[in-house]
Amino acid sequence: MKKCSAVIALAMLCASVVTASALDRKVKINNKTSYVITEFYASNTGTENWEEDILGSDVLASGSSAMINIDDGSGYCKYDFLAVFDDGDQLVSANNNVCELAEFDFTE
C-alpha cells in the first residue's frame, strides 16, 4: 500500500513539473544582426494588432540577448514576434510556440 501511494505521489509530482514548465513563457531573444533592436513585440498568432513594445525604453544591441516574459495571461502558446531595428527595418517571425521555445535568434 505504501509503495502504491509513493508511485502515485511521484506521478503527480512529475505531472506538476511538466505543467509548470509548459506555463513558462520566457524566451531568450538573441540579436544576431549588426543592428540595434529598438522595439520588440509579441502578440498572439492570428490577432490583428501588436501589443505594447516589450523593450520599452530599453534597446537590444547587436550581439546582445534579453530574457523576455511573453506570458500575457491568456494561456496561448503561439505568438508572432516583431523586431524594429534602428535603421527602420522590421522583421516578423510568425507562429512561435513560446511554451516550447527557450531561445529565439533574430538574424540577417
Image: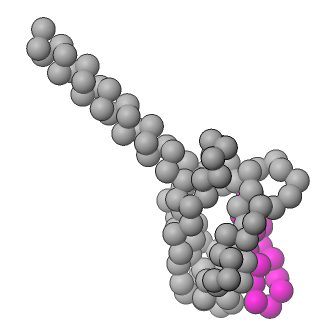
Image location of residue 25, percent across then percent down: 54, 53
Q: Nearer the viewer, residue 19 or 87?
A: 19
Looking at the rendered image, the quarter that the N terminus falls into is top left
Q: Magenta region's main secondary structure?
A: strand
Which residue is at 68% across, 83% downward?
Answer: 57
Q: Is residue 13 above or below residue 49?
A: above
Q: Nearer the viewer, residue 98 or 106?
A: 98
Q: Is residue 24 above or below residue 58?
A: above
Q: Look at the image and give the residue range highlighted in magenta.
A: 80-95
* Residue extending farthest left: 2
Image location of residue 31, percent across then percent down: 60, 80
In the image, taking residue 9 as reference, residue 89 lies left or right, namely right
In the rendered image, is residue 20 in sight? Answer: yes
Image location of residue 91, percent across then percent down: 77, 73
| Colour scheme of the picture | one colour
In the image, taking residue 50 as reference, residue 11 lies left or right, namely left
Which residue is at 56% across, 61% downward?
Answer: 69
Which residue is at 43% across, 42% downward?
Answer: 20
Q: Nearer the viewer, residue 30 or 3?
A: 3
In the rendered image, is residue 100 in sight? Answer: no
Check residue 97 for magenta coloring.
no
Looking at the rendered image, the quarter that the C terminus falls into is bottom right
Image location of residue 71, percent across then percent down: 60, 53
Q: Is residue 67 above or below residue 51?
A: below
Q: How many marks?
A: 0
Which residue is at 45% across, 37% downward?
Answer: 19
Q: Is residue 28 above or below residue 94?
A: below
In the image, taking residue 26 as reference, residue 52 lies left or right, namely right
Check residue 90 for magenta coloring.
yes
Q: For residue 6, what is the image quadrant?
A: top left
* Residue extending farthest right: 48
